[in-house]
Amino acid sequence: ELKVEQNPLFLSMQEGKNYTIYCNYSTTSDRLYWYRQDPGKSLESLFVLLSNGAVKQEGRLMASLDTKARLSTLHITAAVHDLSATYFCAVDNTGNQFYFGTGTSLTVIP
Amino acid sequence: EAQVTQNPRYLITVTGKKLTVTCSQNMNHEYMSWYRQDPGLGLRQIYYSMNVEVTDKGDVPEGYKVSRKEKRNFPLILESPSPNQTSLYFCASSFFTYNSPLHFGNGTRLTVT
C-alpha cells in the first residue's frame, strides 16, 4: 500500500517569513499533486508535478519533486494571511488510485 | 460553469437506513472518484471509475457501493450506514491523462446516528 506522509501537520508562521512543507511517499511514482483546502470548503488544485526535478511556481508558492528521494516540497515565500489553509499532497500509483497525505494546516499570523 | 455537483451538502440519518449521495460533472471527464475525509487521516479513496460501467475499489470500499451508468453521474450508495461512516465525503473528476488534476465537488457532510 502506498503511504504518503506530510510534515509538519500544523504550521503557524508569521507574515513575511518563509517555510517549507514536506511530502514523502513510500513507493515509486512520478506524478504528484498539491491541493489547497480552505476551512469548510472543497479542495482546489495548486500544482501537478509530472517528472523528476519538476518545479512549478505560482505567486508565493513553489513546488518541486524529487522522485528518487520520493519527496516533494511546497515552499512558501514571504507568507501572507491569504495563504492560511490546509495543504494536501497526493500521489497516484497507476493513474487510477490516489493517495493523500494527512494535510498541513497553515496559519499565517500578522 | 465547469463544476462537480454533489447533493446533499448535509445529511443526518440513522443506522441501517439506505442512502445515496449524488455526484454529477459537466466537464465530460472520464475519471470519477469518491473520497472520505476524516480528521488526522487526510482523504481516503473509496471507489473510482475510469469510464461508463467501469468501477473499482479504492483504499476503503467496505460498506459502500457505486455505479456509473452515465458518464456524468457517479452516485455513492450506503446500503446500511453505520456510525463509523460519519464523515465528510468528496466526489472528484478528471480527464484520464497524466497531467490532469482532480476537480472536487463541495462535499457532503454525513452523520449516522
Image (cartoon, rainbow, N blue to C red):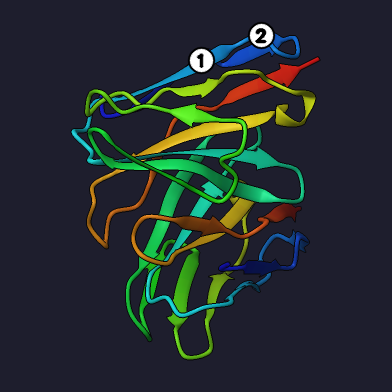
Q: Chain of mark 2?
A: B
For residue B17, which numbered disc appears in the image? 2
Q: Residue at 70% of width from left, 29% of height from top?
A: B85
Q: Residue at x 66, y 21 (%)?
A: B110
B24 over A25 or under it: above or below? above
Residue A70 is labelled as none
- x and y percent of residue B75 in the render? 41, 22
- Residue A85 in view, yes or no: no
* Residue labelled with disc 1: B20
Nearer to the camera, B58 or B26: B58
Neighbours of disc 2 within 10 Å: few (<14), some (14-19), many (20+): few
Q: Residues within 10 Å of mark 1 (few under 14, many from 20)?
A: some
Q: Specify the quadrant that holds the C terminus of chain B.
A: top right
Front-lying residue, B2 or A17: B2
Q: Does residue B63 appear to the left or right of B96 in the view shown? A: right
Circle 1: element type: strand
Location of residue B37 by image quarter: top right
Asked if residue B86 lies left or right of residue B33, the reply is right
Q: Is residue A67 above or below residue A100?
A: below
- Residue drawn at the location 52% of the way across and 82% of the way down: A70
| Circle 1 chain | B
Residue occupying the point 57% across, 12% down: B19
Residue B56, image x, y percentages: 40, 44
